[in-house]
Image (tube, helix red, strand yellow):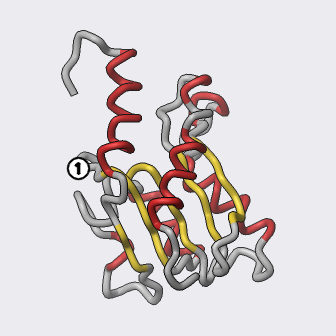
Amino acid sequence: MKPGADLAGYVRRAMAAAAGAAASGDVPIGAVVFGPDGAELAAAHNAREALGDPTAHAEIIALRAAARVCDDGWRLTGCTLAVTLEPCTMCAGAAVLARVDRVVFGAWEPKTGAVGSLWDVVRDRRLTHRPEVVGGVLADECAALVADFFRERRPDRHL
């Protein structure tokens, strides 16, 4: 991990990646993988609707793309995964299996969050790899992305 990494900058970049999701009707969640030196390896947004794939979460797509350009195959040792929304169980598990060193996210997700809210998959002491977690970075801005998306689609429902 790059000492003194700009975590807010990482999350801002994930927010920029999220912008592509709404055009296809996907929830605007973005993820970016940064290498140990802080260089961007891959960025993605949710694409479940666009691809008709329930596993096409931003984190999964970004982790796959980063693994293709990483020197250590699928291992993303030393890397940081930055996401606009707290990862779900699938994405948290993928981060552990990819061996990322740190997960940084914006908004907490009390309904499905798996790195501290509902579950804490990544810090389970039974696992052989446990990434550092930094949550709540630009939380209000990231939460607004999702809230605005659903407000436009469900104006009669309260979030």
Task: Say if 143 sits above or below 86 in the image.
Answer: above
* Residue labelled with disc 1: 110
Q: Position of residue 79 (x, y in %)?
A: 60, 76
Residue located farthest toward the left when viewing the structure as drawn: 158
Specify the quadrant that holds the N terminus. Answer: bottom right
Task: Say if 127 sits above or below 104 in the image.
Answer: below
Task: Say if 90 sits above or below 112 in the image.
Answer: below
Q: How many marks?
A: 1
Q: Secondary structure at mark 1?
A: loop
| Residue visible at 54% across and 23% down in the picture | 25
Image quarter for residue 19?
Answer: top right
| Residue visible at 54% across and 46% down in the picture | 30
Specify the quadrant that holds the C terminus. Answer: top left
Left or right of residue 134: residue 159: left
Q: Position of residue 12 (x, y in %)?
A: 51, 51
Pointer 1 local density, CA inside 10 Å: few below 14, some 14–19, many at least 20: few
| Residue visible at 41% across and 56% down in the picture | 87
Q: Position of residue 63 (x, y in %)?
A: 63, 62
Q: Position of residue 2 (x, y in %)?
A: 58, 82
Left or right of residue 28: residue 124: left
| Amino acid at the residue labelled 1 | Pro
Q: Considering depth in this image, is 88 or 71 the residue closer to the camera?
A: 71
| Residue visible at 69% across and 60% down in the picture | 64
Left or right of residue 63: residue 80: left
Task: Say if 12 sits above or below 124 in the image.
Answer: above
Residue located farthest toward the top when viewing the structure as drawn: 156
Q: Considering depth in this image, is 53 or 73 the residue closer to the camera?
A: 73
